[in-house]
Structures are given as C-alpha cells and as structure tokens.
Image (cartoon, rainbow, N blue to C red):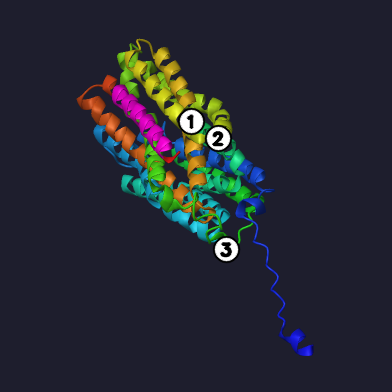
Amino acid sequence: MALSVNTMKQAPVPQPAPASYVVRNQSYWKRNLAVCVFGSFTTLVSLSMLLPFLPLYVAQLGAKSPAAVVQWSGVAFGATFFGTAITAPVWGRLADRFGRKPMLVRAAIGMAVVMSLIGVAHNVAELVTLRLIAGLVGGYASASIVMIGTQAPRERAGWALGVLSTGALSGNLIGPLIGGFLPDLVGIRGTFFVGGAMIAVAAAATIFLVREDFDRHADTKPSAHSAGAHNPAAHRLLIGVLLITAMMVLFANMSIEPIITVYVGQLGVPHEHLARMAGIIMAAAAFGSMLTAPRLGALADRIGSWNVIIGCLAVTGLVMLPQAFVTQWWQLALLRGLMGMTIAGLLPSIAKMVRHLVDESHSGKTLGYLQSAQFSGQVIGPLVGGQIGAHVGIHQVFFVTGTLLVLCAGLNYWVHKRDA
C-alpha cells in the first residue's frame, strides 16, 4: 500500500495563461488616447507652423535666387517625411520588444531638442539636415498610432484611431495659422524655440500621464491563436495591399499641394490674394477630415473595415474628378472639403485592419511599416503631382489621382472577396 502511494505522482497544476497586452492595459487606453491626441496635435503644430515662413528662413540662411529658395524649401519640408518613412518600421519593431511608451518618450524628447536646434541653424544645409534628423528620431504621431492601435479593444479600435487622426489633422490645420503670426511676435528663430517648448510639454505629459503594462517576456511571443488568422505570413497579400492603399491616401491628398496656388491663380483670384485663398483651400480638406474621422472610424467598428476602405476609396476617387472643372476658387474649396470628409475614414480603417491581421507581438512592427507607407505617399505625391502639372497639365493631376483611387478600390474589393 505504501509503495502504491509513493509511486503515484500528483499531476502538475496547469498555470493560467498570462493576460494579453490589451486586457492588461484596458484601464489605461482611454487616458493614453487623450495624451496621444494632445501630443500628436502639439508635435504636428510645431512641424507644420514653419510652412508660411519657411521660404523666408531659407533666404535668411543664404539662398540667393528665387529658384534656390523654392528648391531648398521643398527639400527642407520633405526631409522630415523622408526620415520618418525610413525609421518608422525600426521604431515599430523596438516598440514590440521594449514597449510603446518608451517610443513615445523618445520621439517627444528627440523632436523637442531638434526643433530647438533648427532655430540656431547657420545655413541651408544645416536646416535640411536637422529636418531630416527630426524625421529620423521623431514620429510622435506614428508612435501614438502604434500604442493606441495595440491597446484599444478591437471593437473600439476604429473609433480610437479616428479620434487620434483628428488630433493630428487639427495640428496640421492650425500649425500654419500659428506660423503666420508668431514670427512677428518672437522672430523666425524664436518660433522654433516656441515649437520645441510645446513638444517638451507633450514629452512631460507622456512621461507622467501615459501608463503601460508591458511584459517583455509575454508580449514579445506570439499568442496561442496566432498560427491561423493572426499569422502575418498567412495574410501577406492583404497587408501588402493595405500598405499600398495607405500610400495612395497620402499620395492623393498631397498630389495637388505643390501647384494649388498656380491653379487658384488660373481661376481668376487676384495675385495679392493667392496665398490666402490657397491656404483656405488646403485647410478645407483637413477641416473636412476632422469632422468625419471619428465617425467613419466608428462606422468601421460596426460594418467592417473593408467596407469603409472600399467605399471611401471609390467616393474619394469620384470626388477628385470634378475638381478639374471648377471655375471659382470656392468651388474647389468645397470639393476639397468633401474629399477630406471621405478620405478621413481610410487611415483609421486601414490601421484597424492591419492590427486585426497580425499577432500582438508583431503589431508595432507592422504598424510601423504602415506609417512608412503613408509618409512615402506624402513624399511621392507632391513630386508626381508637380511633374504631371508642369508637363501635362494641372487638370490631369485630378484625373490621374482619381483614377488611381478607383483602381485601388477595385484592388481592395478583389483581395477582400478572395480572402472571404
């Protein structure tokens, strides 16, 4: 009897699986969303407020001819987006390994320092280099998408990413307005110090208010259900199409930006009012997006991201076409505002879809690639639009962009039905 008792082995008690990253952070994500909206707004205000006076600063730094001023202004403006496109996947991968909050803190502190250094640049080369470094080390808005995209519950992710998009759009809208009068108060160089201070406030808010429960051992391993629907390799085609779509969204939005002032001039606007009317038209798209981004994000939560992506692509492509036939500047402003309302549902829905297709342990890296695709479109769009407008005609920019968006809608419909 004693022998039988000794030989009986007690079965090990199974240990419960650790809670997922989303579950552990479910009490933090709303507060983190509020901080990320503020930080994205602040950093993008600081980055975009130089638009009205960038040519003046370039001339102040030594550019002599008008052609040189235009050329170096374009290079300096695009350098930040180029830098972010390069490093966004790297920062996303590090977010998967070390947590999302460290990436937010890194971006905020890095941008605060570099923005202040731009105010003491000695020549145009230093300005371009510092703008490039701002993109390489910065990317607060991109890091925010990674954090909120991975923390928000799946059924609320579309709404949360839409709200976050509103903060970024608001920053891009208000930044140039602030940049129009701030240099008169503090000087051009002083404006960069103000921008650096604003980002420093966002950095402090991120450090002290953002909460994250990150378990490096558990959160860097694929979850138990990742072998099927959440395996990135299983949905490589879907993710590839979504990355192309994200690039096309920014391509479409930015393709007309370099030549919009010229187009407004062709509509009969007096020369002395060109800059103001062009600014209103540029702002119309951002304002329209602000109105609908959270609503379309919430709609994606209800009816599915694919439906919103396909519908918004098709409608936006169709809205691009009548912009080539306007006869008054206000007609263009209304159509750009309508385009902003329809295009606003795309990026939150794409990010939500990407998040659903990959395992939590790979979400930061994949969302980083998504950010890289977006900023690539922001760089390529003005370049292609400018070339088409210069060599073929401004009206053809709208035709080409609208056609590409409709074709992209068809591509998304095909891969959606193929995967269904």
Q: What is the x, y in percent for residue 235? A: 42, 47
For residue 301: magenta? no
State the SS at label 3.
helix
State the SS at label 1.
helix
In the rendered image, the residue lying farthest to the left is 391
State the SS at label 2.
helix
10 Å neighbourhood of mark 3: few (<14), some, or many (≥20)? Answer: few
For the residue marked with disc 1, what is the amino acid?
A: Asn
Q: CA distance from mark 3 to mark 1?
A: 35 Å
The range drawn in magenta is 397-418
Residue where numbered disc 3 is placed: 216
Q: Which dot marks residue 162?
A: 2
| Near-viewer residue (17 or 53) | 17
Q: Nearer the viewer, mark 3 or mark 1?
A: 1
| For marks 2 and 3 on the same chain, the one whose residue lies earlier in the sequence | 2
10 Å neighbourhood of mark 1: few (<14), some, or many (≥20)? Answer: some
| For marks 2 and 1 on the same chain, the one whose residue lies earlier in the sequence | 2
For the residue marked with disc 2, what is the amino acid?
A: Gly
Residue where numbered disc 1 is placed: 307
Q: Quadrant of the C terminus?
A: top left
Q: Residue at x 71, y 80 (%)?
A: 9
In the rendered image, the residue lying farthest to the bottom is 3
| Among the 4 quarters of the image, the one containing residue 7 | bottom right
Q: Residue at x 58, y 46 (%)?
A: 202
Q: Is residue 218 visible?
A: yes
